[in-house]
Amino acid sequence: MDFTIRKATKEDMPAVLALIKQLAEFEKEPDAVLVTVEDLVSDGFGEQPAFFCYVAEVANKVEGIALGYNRYSTWKGKIIHLEDLIVNTELRGSGIGSALLDAIVKHGYEMGVKRINWEVLDWNEPAIKFYESKGANVMRDWDVVQMNEESIKNYVAKL
């Protein structure tokens, strides 16, 4: 299969959002996506972009994305976080996921980061096997901790 990996543009954001929604369906949270195309454009392409994104294009159609952002580790220094690597369900196994991960790892290498991290659902064995085959360490003894918007508001209200 012929595909191209390139940096995303503002014009790609409707397709990026469609893939984000496809992932939410796969992860059994179809109503969790609140971000809009407008958010993606303003957050990713403003004066200080909140994220970077690579897309996989097949026959002029975006069929995969890798979206990440810069972080800082008190132990390591500069790191990046891979928020999502998504390949259209119909094209999984085509090499697009590997190529997108390659782009993220090269991006991190060029930035001189000390680590690239991301999460994977514990029941997504195909993804876990894919990441382990690439040399990633799936750290099953760490738990993800989050506060949603409501939790943040409640916390601040108690200050």
Image: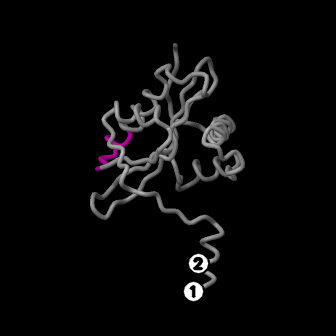
23, above or below 83, in the image:
above
Q: Residue at x 33, y 55 (%)?
A: 78
Q: Nearer the viewer, residue 128 or 72?
A: 128
Q: Which mark is residue 117?
A: none
Outermost residue to the top: 1
- Res 91 quadrant in image: top right
**Coordinates of residue 85 in the picture (x, y in percent):** 51, 38
**Coordinates of residue 106 in the picture (x, y in percent):** 36, 36
Seen in the image, is 13 located left or right of residue 74? right
Residue 110 belongs to the span the image colors magenta: yes
Q: Which residues are magenta?
A: 107-114
CA–CA distance in space, label 2 to label 1? 7 Å
- Res 62 quadrant in image: top right
17, above or below 73, in the image:
above
Seen in the image, is 112 located left or right of residue 10? left
Asked whether the residues under the numbered discs 2 and 1 touch, taking CB atoms below 8 Å apart as contact, a structural biologist would say yes
Q: Nearer the viewer, residue 102 or 41?
A: 102
Outermost residue to the front: 123
**Coordinates of residue 104 in the picture (x, y in percent):** 41, 38
Q: Which mark is residue 155?
A: 2
Mark 2: secondary structure: helix
| Residue tagged 1 | 159
Q: Amino acid at mark 1?
A: Leu
Q: Amino acid at mark 2?
A: Tyr
If the image is split into quadrants, where does the C terminus sit?
A: bottom right
Q: Residue at x 57, y 24 (%)?
A: 57
**Magenta stretch prevailing secondary structure:** helix
Q: Nearer the viewer, residue 85 or 147?
A: 147
- Res 26 quadrant in image: top right
Specify few, some or many for label 1: CA neighbours under 10 Å numbering under 14, 14-19, or 20 or more: few
Residue 33 belongs to the span the image colors magenta: no
